[in-house]
Image (tube, rainbow, N blue to C red):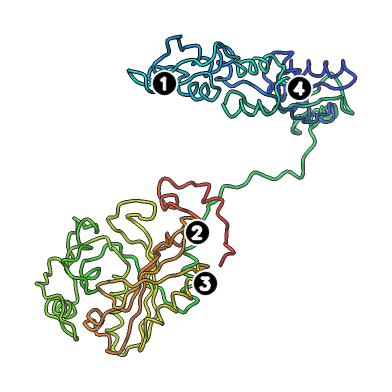
Amino acid sequence: MADTGVVEILLKRIEAVDGGVDSQDVATALSVDHQVVVGAVKSLQSLGDIISAEQRSSKHWELTGEGQETAEKGSHEARVFNSIPDEGLAQSELMKLPSGKVGFSKAMSNKWIRVDKGHEGGPRVFRMVEKIDDSVQDKLVQIQKGIADEVDEKEKNELKKRKLLTEVTVKSYWMTKGPSFSTTITKQEAELTPEMITSGSWKQKSFKPYNFEALGVALDCGHLHPLMKVRTQFRQIFLEMGFTEMPTNNFIESSFWNFDSLFQPQQHPARDQHDTFFLSDPAISRDFPLEYLEKVKKVHSEGGFGSQGYKYDWKIEEAQKNILRTHTTAVSARMLYKLAQQGKFTPVKYFSIDRVFRNETLDATHLAEFHQIEGVVADYGLTLGDLMGILHQFFTKLGITKLRFKPAFNPYTEPSMEIFSYHEGLKKWVEVGNSGVFRPEMLLPMGIPEGVSVIAWGLSLERPTMIKYGINNIRELVGHKVNLQMVYDSPICRLDS
């Protein structure tokens, strides 16, 4: 309930006039904040039809803090003019004055002053007129006295541009007597209690009307993050295209499966601590398929299967090092090795969506921990055209149609392609994945039959999500800078795909 005294005074003022009362006038008369009177109006409205209140708005001009100073001391240009003695003043000294920079340019425009650049000792400023008329100060004083009508709108807007004047919108209520007007206020009860029923006092009480149209308080509930929504969409598309999901529950991987099995040399920059997170406990793995390990060692150090290899001394100590996996292609390598051990080859289509880790510098498009979407198809006679076709089909289902492919190099694919999609927010092409055809040096040591081609790709989950949701900075999608309201407000489903 608003202040009882203000409510009573308000009712008496309304009763005393034939027309109506303005809430702003009441606030001025009582020397109280206008919001106090507004609170009294809202309180009376909640009691029924005691008063009628119509909201009105009016505009008036007010001086800013700088404008009040100008009305008192004069405009910047006038203060500059008055500070120049008959013998002139060095421009460097003039610029040190509080009004120097602004006032100098205005006084020059008004042709009140001139600059003698050839003066000994540097440029010197002199007066050009005997006296000046400070119209800026005069106009501000008029507005301050409440006679703003004498200043035309063009002049007011000029003062507004100089931030000396501001236009203020004032909202108030015009109040008149309502059908049930009374100066005596009876508090309405909000609820019917057992005591009222027992004593029968409810018969003499006035109750607030129930609002059966009011909505209940919204329940607190969970919200799916946009990243998880797009992840679900990716997964559904893969399943619709006939893919089988690979198990990806091992964040820790040995360098052997993460690098060596993929024909990635041990001196490759990606295996450096600047790019990969290495584990200290447990530091190494020991359980490897020995026959396959020997074939990997040989193809690296000596070559084989039509390749000359890398010609270096391959070391088991490097292959044993444990790391946080840098890509889910390590999972694909395990699955292809398992496929090769089945004896009779059968075509397969695998996919996975899970987290990978890289020692990246954080910026608008890079994180140290992110999701990789892995796709692998193994069959006889597959070509680069099949790979491009699958990627076009996949991204079209996702609602992303602007794609470009760029030749690239990967140690374990040949040919290789980078995949780019156009980001409408960033207004540029953003890399969203990498792809290629697995090399024979990777597949044949596993036991995959000759003639079988394996096409594969690794895509980002975060970047397509950014494109779909118009997010320009990846740190606004995941991490401590995420706006949770964005998570709450993101639509349940998107209709752009």
Residue depicted at x 43% and y 45%: 481
Q: Earlier in the sequence, mark 3 or mark 1?
A: 1
Q: Quadrant of residue 278?
A: bottom left
Secondary structure state at the residue bearing disc 4: helix
Residue behind mark 3: 397
Screen quadrant of the C terminus:
bottom right
Of residues 164 and 437, which is closer to you in this image? 164
Q: How many numbered marks appear?
A: 4
Secondary structure state at the residue bearing disc 3: helix
Task: Indicate the position of residue 369 as horizontal and vertical percent values.
Answer: 34, 56
User: Does the CB distance between marks 4 and 1 fall below 8 Å?
Assistant: no
Residue behind mark 1: 116
Kind of residue at badge 4 = Ser
User: From this viewpoint, is residue 247 visible?
Assistant: no
How far apart, in angstroms, are the residues tagged by discs 3 and 2? 18 Å
Task: Indicate the position of residue 287 as horizontal and vertical percent values.
Answer: 19, 71
Disc 2 packing (10 Å; few <14; some 14–19; many ≥20): some
Please tell me the numbered disc located at residue 23: 4
Of residues 480 and 146, which is closer to you in this image? 146
Q: Earlier in the sequence, mark 4 or mark 1?
A: 4
Q: Earlier in the sequence, mark 1 or mark 2?
A: 1
How far apart, in angstroms, are the residues tagged by discs 4 and 2? 50 Å
Residue depicted at x 37% and y 65%: 372
